[in-house]
Image (cartoon, coloured by chain):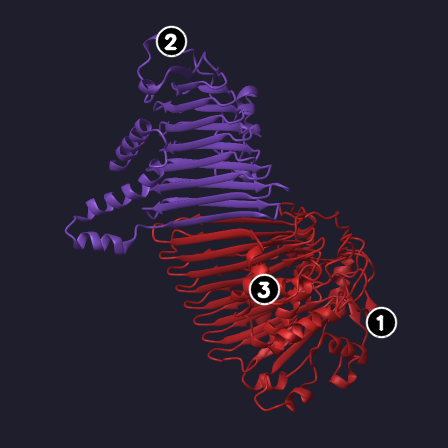
Amino acid sequence: MSLSAALRSGDVSLLPGKRDEDWKWTDLRGLLRVLPATAPALDLSGLTQGPFDALADQRQVVAGGHESVSIDVPADSKLAVALRVLSRDGGALSGKVAIRVGAGAKLRLLESYEGDASAYVTDTALSIVLGAGAAVERVVLAADGAEGVNVSQAQVTLAPGAEYGQTVITNGARRQRIETQVTHPGANAKLRLDGLYLLEEKRHADLTTVVLHQGVDGATDQFTRGVVRDQSRGIFQGRIVVEEGADRTDARMRHNALILSDKAEIDAKPELLIFADDVQCAHGNTIGALDEEALFYMRQRGLPETEARALLIEAFVGAVADRIGFEPVRDIARAWAAERLRG
Amino acid sequence: MAAVKQTIEHVEALEKYQHGFSTDIAQDFAPKGLNADIVRFISAKKNEPEWMLAWRLDAFERWLAMDEPEWAKVHFPRIDYQDSYYYAAPSEKKGPKSLDEVDPEILAVYEKLGISLKEQAVLAGVEGAPRYAVDAVFDSVSVVTTFKKELAQVGVIFCSMSEAIREHPELVKQYLGSVVPVSDNYYACLNAAVFSDGSFVYVPPGVRCPMELSTYFRINAENSGQFERTLIIADKGAYVSYLEGCTAPMRDENQLHAAVVELVLMDDAEIKYSTVQNWYPGDPVTGKGGIYNFVTKRADCRGDRSKVSWTQVETGSAITWKYPSCVLRGEGSVGEFYSIAITNGRQQADTGTKMIHLGANTRSRVISKGISAGKSSNTYRGLVSAHPKAKGARNFTQCDSLLIGKTCAAHTVPYIEARNGSCVFEHEATTTKLSEDQLFYAMQRGLSQEEAVQLLVNGFVKDVLQELPMEFAVEAQKLVAISLEGSVG
């Protein structure tokens, strides 16, 4: 059951739907009755700039005619890559990205999903393998169209001592899922998985993560926030698995969401599956409206209500962007979020 | 201090499952297996009216079309539903009119369990001593209901389900299956077809039930499933506290237990439902022979400002699969769930709650404490949801897991669905092992390792124990200690 299998075979019955536990809130089978034809090849020469092009050493595009990309970062080197996945003209796209990061190497992966206003269907499978002591910072900016369907699934494999940080920022799509599965060997490898969704109108976003702790001394820190308004729907599914013997694992997961409309919806499933005893695992989940007392306080100080609201939301959202390590990227992420919030 | 000392002595005296005796009483069995004739047999045995039989047969038909659910994090060999007895009544000479007619061996069983059935004995007790009304379900049939007269004076109906079907058919017809529909789930549907007995409580408007009501379930016969059905109705402004205790003897074959509990609450009503479950957990090494406990429990807060509180201490059963739920329909209704689930040996528990907020300003609170030891697995699975109309819904959930030993597992699987802009849901969960520092401190003060673990575990579950009625709390505390015996060192 996967979108890529359905796209490859053209068989809609292979689409994941409500009855698949991991997809119960992101029903593709009920949504897609027919699959669109494969997107036509894209001429790269007339391409406009992507959001991260200026910050990258290397630019890669996944689009019709350019379905697979592979990136190799040699050991002990440094690289910044801007990876763009372009969806357009109501076509289907099934992309594959393979990334290998050598021992001790550093990669900054700046990924953007850019979709037009058409009813496209895009599926991207990424594989990211980190060598010992390698470091990756991945920032995903998902700017899909309101009619698009986009599924991105990344398989991340860490080696001992590796460090992986990720921030996903999205404003959703008709149906959108950004999934990250991490195999964590423990052994002082460090993982940070952050997410931010800002949804309006009828948009839908699903941030799903699965972290598999397999060895001793692993650390995971997860932080996701979201704001939903109008009739939008935000979904957070986080699963942390600590396998037998993965002692001294320290895993933390937080999800906070704001619902700003009575027709919006948030669904959350923060799971902990623990098979070892010497662990520290925790998750926290809050869903609610803006704090009326904070609003009252600000208005009492002379701020107009709309401004007070905007300020509170900005502060709420800013906490995720602040954790991005590289400042220029942080600024782009903040500006992008601020623009979405103003709307 | 006395309680602590008593606890320690108790634990020392015990080497294995305390209630693992089986009593030889003449039993009246239905033939093995399950088909429409068995359903008819059960119904006939209980002299049920025609409408009840029709209800059962309808349930049986629907059950045949259903598939056994497999989503829970529990593993067990497939149950052969044809290899079990669905009705086992202790044979009796035309229904006991008084306690004297009850098989003395049954009474001896209860004495071993430490519950007093004899109302004279209780009445003769110290003035102001707590009093319970007990409905005892032995295998499948309710044996005796005490204190009936006194309850009747205030208008409270407390009797066995079969009696209620005969004597209060209008109430049963109105409410039975209205909270847990016949085809709600596989096991509830099976229960609807073959349920043998259970308790029925009706508390009329404005009445505060003068005593705690209690049911004691005990599975006795080999290879017999026990399917009780409990229905409690608290009318406007009524209050009732209901205790349920369960034990089963040691047996080799796994025994199926699929009960259904329905609570109905009208305006301003309150029900407090407490369970201590201590069924045989199976052999600690092989996991053989324990009870399969697949229970559907649900409260429907139909009235405004009604309140339901579930408290459970789950220490027994090979497999526990149970989610006491609250449907918060009435405006301002409140649902609470306090749970201690302890697994040791080869036990598996998948338990939690559902808080379904439908009405405005409904509130719920979930406190769940899971402890796993040995090779056991303990899962908290819960749902908190708010309907668009549930303006101002509020939930607080805390689930903590404690792991003792390297080979056990603890899982937390919460589902949170918020569908309006004014609900506030908070959820927090932690999983840790017993703190080495705290253990060291306690042992340094002269406690043995086992005592130190008990002390820390009691502290861990304190929030829930406090919610139990006083007498139950003492029993539960002992049970916690006994269940964890031999899990350290």
The reply to whether residue B279 is in sight is yes
Whole-percent x, y for residue B176 in the image:
59, 65
- Looking at the colours in the rendered structure, which chain would you say is drawn in purple? A
Locate residue A32 relative to residue A115 in the image: left or right.
Answer: right
Locate residue B282 relative to residue B259 in the image: left or right.
Answer: right
Q: Nearer the viewer, mark 2 or mark 3?
A: 3
In this view, A118 is above or below B344: above
Q: Amino acid at mark 2?
A: Asp
Q: Chain of mark 2?
A: A
State how far apart marks 3 and 1 are (Cα): 45 Å
B250 vs B224, nearest the viewer:
B250
User: Can you identify the residue that label 3 sits on?
Assistant: B442
Q: Amino acid at mark 1?
A: Asp
Q: Quadrant of the C terminus of chain A?
A: top left
Q: Chain of mark 1?
A: B
Label 3 crowd bin: few (<14), some (14–19), many (20+), radius 10 Å: some
> Element type at marker 2?
loop
Q: Which residue corresponds to the image point at 51% horizontal and 29% vertical from the top-left?
A: A162
> Element type at marker 3?
helix
Whole-percent x, y for residue B181 in the image:
58, 57
Q: Are marks 3 and 1 on the same chain?
A: yes
B64 vs A278, nearest the viewer:
A278
User: Can you identify the residue that label 2 sits on?
Assistant: A43
> Element type at marker 1?
loop
- Looking at the colours in the rendered structure, which chain would you say is drawn in red? B
Whole-percent x, y for residue B366 in the image:
49, 59
